[in-house]
Image: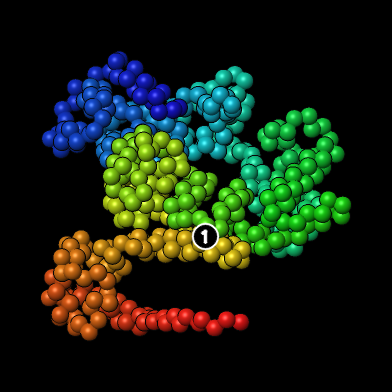
C-alpha cells in the first residue's frame, strides 16, 4: 500500500468510528505537537492514524509512541513501515499483494519474504497470546501465498544486478581469463541453479531446455566482458576470446566501484575542478537517494542559502539531493531528521571511497589538475571543512563548540600557527575556552609546528645565449 492509499484508507475508516476515550493532558500535548493536522483529527476522533515516509521524523516518532501506548488502535501504513518497524499488532491486514512500479514496469508482485515479514507483526510474543493475519489477494495470486506459514519460501539470486562488477572482480583475480572460464565460473553460481529452475523470474521467456540456459549464460558473460572492454576497463580479444585486466579494473574492484560509476570517473577530464567533481560525484548511483516530500523544505533552504555552491531552483532529483548533502556534511550543518542525517553520512563516506579511485586513476594518467582537485576534495570531506575556509579550521580539534569558534575568530587567529609558542593558559585566555579545549588546541599547534615548512625560491635570469 502506498502513501496516498494509507491516508485515504485511514480517513475512510475514521468516518465509521468514534472514540469516547478521555485523553490525558500528556497525550493532548503530544497531539498538539504534531505537524500534520489531519493525523491529529483522525486520532482524536477515531484513534486511527496513517504512517509513511512522507511524514516528518518527529511526527513518525509521536505516532509510533501513541500506537505502542494503546492510544492509536488502527494504523494504516505503507509496506515499507510494515517490514521495517517494530510495531506489534493483534491483527495485520495486507491490502493487496502487488505494487505499481511506474508505467514502464507496471504492477509487480510482492515477494513472499516481504509478506512474511509483514504478517510477523501479528501476535508477537510478549505482547499477545496469538495473532491474526489476513492477506487480501486475487484468485490468480492465491496459490503463490497460500503456504506462507509452511516456511516454503523460495530464495532467488540477486547476482544478475551486479554481474558485470562480479565478472570484473574475477578477471582481476585471474579466475576468469577468457569466455570459457567465465562460463565455467557462472556455472558454479547460485544464479545458474535458479536460472535452470525458474528462468521466468529473471525475465527470460521461452527457456525449454538446458541448452537454452547455456545460451543465456554465454550471452550474459560475453555481454559483460564486451561492456568492460568497450569502456576501457579490460582488454578483450574477440579472436582468441582472451580477457586481460587493465589498471582501471583493479582500481574499480579495490574501491568497490559500480560499473556505471567507473565509467563516470574515467570520463573526468584532466583539468576537472572541485565543483565539477562535486557535480560528477552527485550523479553516481552509489550516492542516489530518493527525495522525500518532508525533506524538501530543509534541502531547499540549505541549497539556496547555506552551502558554498548553491543550486538554481528547487531540490527535486536524487543528484541534486546528493550535491546538497555533500556540502551539508562538509559545512557541519545540523540535520534534525534521523534518516536524512544517516544518508548524509553515507553519501560522504561513499564519496571518499570513490575519490580514492579517482585519485589513483588521475595519478597514473598524469592528470595533474584533476588529481589536485580530487586530493583537496578528499581532504575536505575527511576533515569536514573547506580547504580555504580559515574560520572553521579549529573544528579539527575534538569538542570545539560554536562559542569557542567565535571567540577564536574574534581574537583574530586564523589557524594553529598563530598559537605557536603559547602555553595552554595563554591559549585559554586568548580564546576564552575551557582547559580541555585549550589543551587540544595546544596539541594541534605542536603538530602544526612540526609540519610547518618554510620555502623560499630565488629565480636568476640567465642571459647567456647558446
425 above or below 409?
below
**Image position of 227 (left or right of 443):** right
Horizontal relation, residue 195 to residue 22: left or right: right
Q: To which residue does mark 1 refer?
A: 370
Which residue lies at the image location 51% right of the left edge and 55% below the top edge?
272
Q: Is residue 411 left or right of residue 134?
A: left
Please identify the quadrant where the C terminus is shown.
bottom right
Residue 105 appears at what percent x and percent y?
59, 27
211 or 390, which lies in front? 390
The structure residue drawn at horizontal position 82% and vertical position 37%, both measured from the top left corner, is: 212
User: In the image, residue 378 lies at what x, y percent?
Assistant: 45, 62
Where residue 71 appears, as percent x and y from the top left, is: 25, 32
| Side (left or right) of 12 relative to 347 | left
Visible residue check, residue 438: yes
Q: Secondary structure at mark 1?
A: helix
Number of callouts in the render? 1
Tell me, yes or no, if residue 258 can be seen here.
no
> Which image quarter is the N terminus in?
top left
Assess disc 1: are there few (<14), some (14-19) or many (≥20) residues with their C-alpha within 10 Å of its C-alpha: many
Residue 408 pos. (x, y %): 19, 68
Q: Nearer the viewer, residue 198 or 307?
A: 307
Amino acid at each position: 500500500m502506498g502513501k496516498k492509499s494509507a491516508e485515504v484508507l485511514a480517513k475512510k475508516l475514521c468516518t465509521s468510528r468514534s472514540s469516547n476515550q478521555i485523553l490525558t493532558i500528556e497525550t493532548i500535548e503530544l497531539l498538539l505537537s504534531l505537524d500534520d493536522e489531519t493525523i491529529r483529527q483522525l486520532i482524536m476522533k477515531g484513534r486511527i492514524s496513517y504512517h509513511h515516509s512522507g511524514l516528518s521524523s518527529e511526527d513518525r516518532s509521536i505516532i509510533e509512541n501513541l500506537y505502542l501506548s494503546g492510544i492509536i488502535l488502527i494504523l494504516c501504513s505503507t509496506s515499507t513501515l510494515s517490514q521495517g518497524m517494530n510495531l506489534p499488532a493483534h491483527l495485520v491486514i495486507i491490502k493487496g499483494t502487488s505494487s505499481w512500479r511506474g508505467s514502464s514496469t507496471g504492477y509487480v508482485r510482492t515477494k513472499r519474504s516481504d509478506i512474511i515479514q509483514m504478517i510477523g507483526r501479528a501476535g508477537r510474543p510478549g505482547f499477545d497470546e496469538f495473532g491474526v493475519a489476513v492477506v487480501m489477494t486475487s484468485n490468480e495470486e492465491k496459490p503463490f501465498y497460500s503456504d506462507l506459514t509452511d516456511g516454503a519460501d523460495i530464495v532467488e539470486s540477486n547476482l544478475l544486478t551486479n554481474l558485470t562488477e562480479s565478472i570484473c572482480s574475477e578477471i582481476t583475480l585471474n579466475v576468469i581469463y577468457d569466455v570459457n572460464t567465465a562460463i565455467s565460473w557462472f556455472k558454479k553460481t547460485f544464479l545458474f541453479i535458479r536460472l535452470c529452475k525458474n528462468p521466468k523470474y529473471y525475465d527470460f521467456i521461452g527457456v525449454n531446455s538446458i541448452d537454452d540456459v547455456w545460451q543465456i549464460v554465454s550471452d550474459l558473460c560475453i555481454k559483460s566482458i564486451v561492456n568492460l572492454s568497450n569502456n576501457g576497463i579490460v582488454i578483450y580479444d574477440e579472436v582468441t576470446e582472451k580477457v586481460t585486466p587493465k589498471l582501471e579494473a583493479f582500481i574499480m574492484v579495490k574501491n568497490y566501484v559500480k560499473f556505471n560509476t567507473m565509467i563516470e570517473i574515467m570520463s573526468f577530464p584532466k583539468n576537472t575542478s572541485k565543483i565539477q567533481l562535486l557535480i560528477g560525484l552527485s550523479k553516481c548511483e552509489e550516492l542516489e537517494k530518493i527525495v522525500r516530500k518532508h525533506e524538501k523544505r530543509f534541502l531547499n533552504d540549505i541549497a539556496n542559502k547555506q552551502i558554498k555552491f548553491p543550486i538554481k531552483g528547487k531540490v527535486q532529483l536524487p543528484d541534486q539531493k546528493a550535491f546538497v548533502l555533500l556540502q551539508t556534511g562538509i559545512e557541519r550543518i545540523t540535520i534534525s531528521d534521523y534518516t536524512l542525517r544517516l544518508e548524509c553520512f553515507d553519501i560522504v563516506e561513499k564519496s571518499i571511497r570513490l575519490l580514492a579511485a579517482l585519485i589513483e586513476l588521475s595519478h597514473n594518467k598524469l592528470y595533474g589538475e584533476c588529481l589536485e582537485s580530487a586530493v583537496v576534495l578528499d581532504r575536505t570531506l575527511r576533515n569536514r571543512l573547506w580547504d580555504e575556509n580559515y574560520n572553521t579550521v579549529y573544528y579539527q580539534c575534538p569538542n570545539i563548540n560554536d562559542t569557542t569558534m567565535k571567540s577564536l575568530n574574534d581574537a583574530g587567529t586564523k589557524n594553529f600557527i598563530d598559537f605557536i609558542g603559547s602555553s595552554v593558559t595563554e591559549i585559554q585566555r586568548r580564546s576564552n575556552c575551557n582547559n580541555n579545549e585549550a589543551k587540544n588546541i595546544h596539541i594541534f599547534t605542536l603538530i602544526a609546528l612540526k609540519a610547518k615548512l618554510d620555502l623560499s625560491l630565488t629565480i636568476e635570469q640567465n642571459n647567456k645565449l647558446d
